[in-house]
């Protein structure tokens, strides 16, 4: 059994999300003026769960305005067998399904109709990976605190080299999603490996912290979406190029992304010596 061990940096995108919320079909420049509000969408269907969608509108970057929700949309999800259902609005722009649950290997189409305009995108639900092992090591590197010990995660994921796999690994600290840090993997990094071992060096924690790791199996389109976030961060870090929105799968007139995915999760806390 062959194993790959790599050390990678988390990918910060909190600022990008705060600026654009999500994405659009065509790459466009971000503007910070009082532009017309634009519809934004965050949609997902998990394995063995119904679809959920949130619809809202962008607001002025300079104005302290409450969120504007879209409450009159018609949202339908359909699987490749032709089975579909209409999602119900439950308040504050949230829409949920009931009977159509996520299945491995099934492609789903999400259709969002607002003011007579249709926005539609597809995503395929992939086989879930497995977090084979989750452990930690004491962090003694640059940037560590002198007041208390800090720790880094060591993660081992199961991989099937017979498939083209893509993974998104997210981190939760004391119950809160660390949106600014995630890890992204493609099968191209480990074409013949059954295990993937890595450590997110920009995510550290202390003795009293409770850490949860979720490893999502994603399709190529979702991987490309997060890869574009990487490019945005690289450009911002280098101070070059005008920032842009990552590509969506629902068309150029809506910001956001629809994704089907499965995941495995494990939690860990530093034990007393």
Image (cartoon, rainbow, N blue to C red):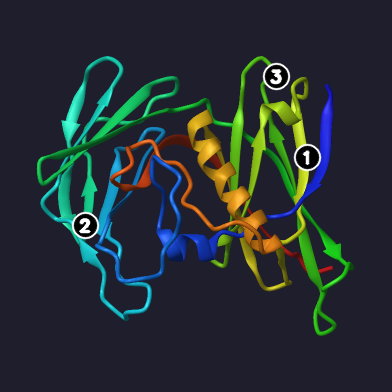
Residue shown at the point (24%, 62%) measured from the top left: 36
Lower sequence index among marks 1 and 2 = 2
The answer to whether residue 176 shows anywhere in this view is no
Instruction: Determine which of the numbered discs, if any, sits on residue 161 in the image.
Output: 3
Instruction: Describe residue 155's horizontal placement relative to residue 2 as left or right.
Output: left
Label 3 and label 1: CA atoms lie apart by 15 Å
Picture quarter with the C terminus = bottom right
Q: Secondary structure at mark 3?
A: loop
Q: Position of residue 66 (x, y in %)?
A: 26, 75
Label 1 and label 2: CA atoms lie apart by 39 Å
Lower sequence index among marks 2 and 3 = 2
Q: Nearer the viewer, residue 45 or 223?
A: 223
Residue shown at the point (22%, 66%) measured from the top left: 68
Asked if residue 254 is positioned above or below residue 30 in the image, the reply reads: above
Residue shown at the point (73%, 72%) measured from the top left: 207
Residue shown at the point (52%, 25%) measured from the top left: 127
Q: Which residue is mark 1?
A: 197
- Tell me, yes or no, whether the two marked residues, 2 and 3, touch with CB atoms within 8 Å: no
Instruction: Describe residue 12's horizontal placement relative to residue 272 as left or right.
Output: left
Q: Nearer the viewer, mark 2 or mark 3?
A: 2
Q: Secondary structure at mark 2?
A: loop
Q: Position of residue 241 (x, y in %)?
A: 60, 56
Q: Secondary structure at mark 1?
A: strand
Picture quarter with the N terminus = top right
Instruction: Describe residue 64's horizontal placement relative to residue 99 as left or right.
Output: right
Q: Position of residue 25 (x, y in %)?
A: 39, 40
Label 2 and label 3: CA atoms lie apart by 40 Å
Lower sequence index among marks 3 and 1 = 3
Instruction: Describe residue 255's horizontal placement relative to residue 268 as left or right.
Output: left
Q: Nearer the viewer, residue 150 or 108?
A: 108
Q: Which residue is mark 2?
A: 93
- Tell me, yes or no, whether the two marked residues, 1 and 2, touch with CB atoms within 8 Å: no
């Amino acid at each position: 059994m062959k194993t790959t061990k790599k050390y990678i940096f988390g990918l910060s995108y909190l600022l990008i999300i705060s600026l654009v919320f999500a994405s659009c079909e065509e790459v466009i420049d971000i503007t910070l003026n009082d532009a017309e509000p634009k519809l934004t969408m965050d949609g997902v269907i998990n394995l063995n769960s119904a679809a959920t969608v949130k619809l809202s509108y962008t607001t002025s970057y300079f104005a302290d305005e409450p969120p504007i929700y879209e409450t009159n949309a018609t949202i339908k999800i359909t699987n490749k067998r032709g089975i579909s259902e209409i999602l119900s609005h439950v308040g504050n722009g949230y829409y949920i399904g009931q009977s159509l649950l996520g299945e491995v290997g099934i492609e789903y189409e999400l259709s969002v109709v607002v003011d007579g305009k249709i926005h539609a995108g597809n995503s395929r639900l992939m086989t879930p990976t497995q977090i084979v092992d989750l452990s930690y090591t004491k962090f003694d590197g640059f940037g560590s605190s002198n007041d208390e010990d800090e720790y880094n995660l060591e993660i081992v994921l199961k991989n099937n080299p017979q498939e083209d796999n893509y993974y998104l690994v997210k981190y939760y600290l004391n119950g809160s999603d660390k949106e600014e840090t995630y890890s992204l993997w493609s099968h191209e990094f480990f074409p013949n490996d059954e295990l993937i071992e890595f450590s997110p060096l920009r995510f550290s924690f202390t003795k009293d912290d409770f850490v949860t790791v979720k490893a999502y199996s994603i399709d190529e389109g979702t991987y490309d979406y997060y890869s574009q976030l990487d490019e945005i961060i690289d450009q911002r870090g280098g101070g070059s190029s005008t920032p842009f929105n990552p590509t969506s799968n629902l068309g150029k007139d809506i910001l956001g992304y629809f994704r089907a995915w499965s995941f495995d999760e494990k939690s860990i806390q530093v034990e007393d010596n």
